[in-house]
Image: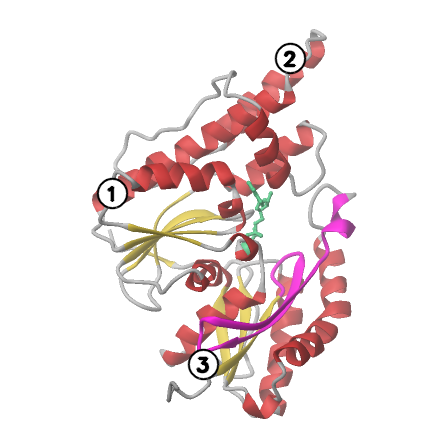
Amino acid sequence: MSSQKRELILAFESSCDETSVAVIENGNKILSNIVATQIKSHKRFGGVVPEVASRHHIEQVTMCLEDAMAKANVTYDELSAVAVTYGPGLVGALLVGVACAKVVAFSHDLPLIPVNHMAGHIYAARFTNEIKFPAMALLVSGGHTELVYLPKENVYQIIGETRDDAAGEAYDKIGRVLGLTYPAGKQIDEMAHRGSDTFSFPRAMFKEDNFDFSFSGLKSAFINKVHHADQVGEKLNADDLAASFQQSVIDVLLHRTEHALNSFSIKQLILAGGVAANQGLRDGLDQLLSRHSDVELLKAPLKLCGDNAAMIGAAGYVAWKNGEVADLALNADPSLEFEWIEK
Ligand code: KG4
Ligand code: ZN
């Protein structure tokens, strides 16, 4: 039997449209991970309405907490710390999780661990395998698309990011043009597998020596194509449109990731964020990494690609071990960012 003390982290996530509370053991074992999604409420608006999100978080968070503690079958006395997402995200939404985490930390005299939501996404991959440093993370979500270098544990440095839309945002925007409901990423991914890349949309392949992405040119080309066809009464194959769009997104992501693989000496490439659930991207990275046999590809488990508190508990455990503790003055930081790597 292992002699390691059982370290239990209670984690909260409420940065966007999922209220989630989890209990994580030793940073890598999920005892519970309750996720209450609000997607149904936001669908009719075609995106997340911040005020509606905050109200739902308030309604859900206490029930999620009770469920998470009951499912994990632990008492508050057994917890080691309370971790919470304090940014980036919607300020009103973040505040609900932060306030709730503070209440638990204060009333049970537990350390409060502030967690960057994007570090959480990276640590979703910790449930696949141990993270080995130095590592590189390709983070693709609804709000962010960035390449993050992890020279050692608990250090995150941005090396490149999108200059305009995030990849998930582009999926959701063109989804609206195709008449799909929000969020459209998963449906477009499925359609793409039935269609083929016949439209040859542009790919923003920067020639410069940087690691940035761009998706707005692709989005405009897509919208123009569909509007023009509407005007002349031409019927375009929606599956082919989806496949062409998806191939362009994947090509851009892979192109810049390959540049990062060639520029940094790393042990692992981590794929994380909501768009990391994309099957085409997962397959594309498998192919890319087959040419870089010295780098291990670590993909976040499909179920943990979207927002959840388990990933916050895993990142929180690492932050806590590294002495990152907040006091009760902790505030939400809607535009929290990792540092840029020194140029
Ligand atoms: O990380 P996430 O859950 O929330 C943010 O922190 O932004 O990411 C949500 C995004 C949405 O834009 C959604 O359309 C996209 O992830 N998404 C996908 C897939 N599943 C979710 N995009 C492409 N392919 C998918 N299979
Ligand atoms: Zn997220």
Q: CA distance from mark 3 to mark 2?
A: 55 Å
Residue 90: image location, x then y, percent:
62, 58
Quarter holding the N terminus?
A: bottom left
At mark 3, the secondary structure is loop
Magenta stretch? Answer: 14-43
Q: Nearer the viewer, residue 113 or 250?
A: 250
Residue that appears at 61% across and 89% down = 76
At mark 2, the secondary structure is helix
Q: CA distance from mark 3 to mark 1?
A: 38 Å
Q: Looking at the rendered structure, which numbered label has been put on residue 157?
A: none
Residue that appears at 46% across and 70% down = 314
Q: Is residue 254 above or below residue 25?
A: above
Q: Is label 3 within 8 A of ligand 2 (CB to nearest ligand atom)?
A: no
Q: Are marks 3 and 1 in contact (CB under 8 Å)?
A: no
Three-letter code for the amino acid on which mark 3 is drawn: Val
Q: Looking at the rendered structure, which numbered label has been put on residue 228?
A: 2
Place residue 53 in its image quadrant. Answer: bottom right
Q: Is residue 17 above or below residue 197?
A: below
Place residue 152 in its image quadrant. Answer: bottom left
Image position of 339 (left or right of 232):
left
Residue that appears at 51% across and 82% down = 8
Residue 258: image location, x then y, percent:
30, 39
At mark 1, the secondary structure is loop
Residue 256: image location, x then y, percent:
34, 38
Residue that appears at 36% across and 65% down = 130
Q: Is residue 241 above or below residue 265?
A: above
Image position of 145 (left or right of 185):
left
Determine which residue is flagged by label 1: 292
Q: CA distance from mark 2 to mark 1?
A: 42 Å
Three-letter code for the amino acid on which mark 2 is drawn: His
**Residue farthest front in this picture:** 1
